[in-house]
Image (tube, coloured by chain):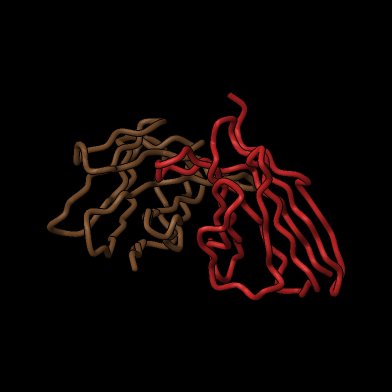
Chain colours: A brown, B red
Amino acid sequence: AQSVTQLDSHVSVSEGTPVLLRCNYSSSYSPSLFWYVQHPNKGLQLLLKYTSAATLVKGINGFEAEFKKSETSFHLTKPSAHMSDAAEYFCVVSDLDDYKLSFGAGTTVTVRA
Amino acid sequence: KAGVTQTPRYLIKTRGQQVTLSCSPISGHRSVSWYQQTPGQGLQFLFEYFSETQRNKGNFPGRFSGRQFSNSRSEMNVSTLELGDSALYLCASSEQGSETQYFGPGTRLLVL
């Protein structure tokens, strides 16, 4: 079974500073990985996805993630945080054989003015 | 294209009742998945449907069921509600052969 582990349950940054959200995955083969964001009382919005093309993936709102097979990691970054980035972020792995997504526990991002 | 829609957005029920939630996928998407989100358990997979067939089911009791119609719309039903069923229920749709799922806004269920 495939799984992901988000290494930080909460990250607090100042507006204008970089954001780093860490995710490690476990997979028996090359996985498809995603980052989703959930703002308070909202559904999940797709930020970006990795599907074995380029290892550096660019997403919406200035986010990007790098797939590192040697480290089994898929960390999400943004150079400069904005107040609107305050939300919960989920690292997700897809199991196409089982037709389902498996979610990490989530990382709550707080942005300080 | 319109996104995934879910109805109702909010529901309050009492223990022992049953509830039906509805999901309309993005036009052209034939796969619909359901997830339960709670503070304690996070996001958990309920089931997935494609062309009216359930292809996978998560580890939930038989009180949780679903179905999909010929127009790809899906419903999930929870019978004999328990307090622990209080959650945000999220529906997602995807195109055939794609692993990318697009989520609706969710239905927030409160069981009293």
Residue A107 visible in image: no
Instruction: Give the image location of residue A6, x and y in percent.
Output: 36, 61
Q: Residue furthest left?
A: A70
Q: Is residue B92 above or below residue B27?
A: below
Residue at 50% x, 44% y: name it: A86
A107 to the left or right of B80: left
Q: Quadrant of the N terminus of chain B?
A: top right
Relative to residue A92, is residue A32 drawn left or right? Answer: left
What is the quadrant of residue B34 in the picture?
bottom right
Give percent across and percent down for residue B26.
58, 33
Q: Nearer the viewer, residue B50 or A29?
A: B50
Residue B79 vertical position relative to residue A106 in the rendered view, above or below: below
Q: Quadrant of residue A43?
A: top right
Q: Count every numbered label the image shows and give the total.
A: 0
Residue A91 location (% of width, % of height): 39, 53
Above/below status of A72 relative to A33: below
Q: Is residue A18 left or right of residue A104?
A: left
Residue positioned 12% across, 57% down in the render: A70
Residue A98 appearing in the image = yes
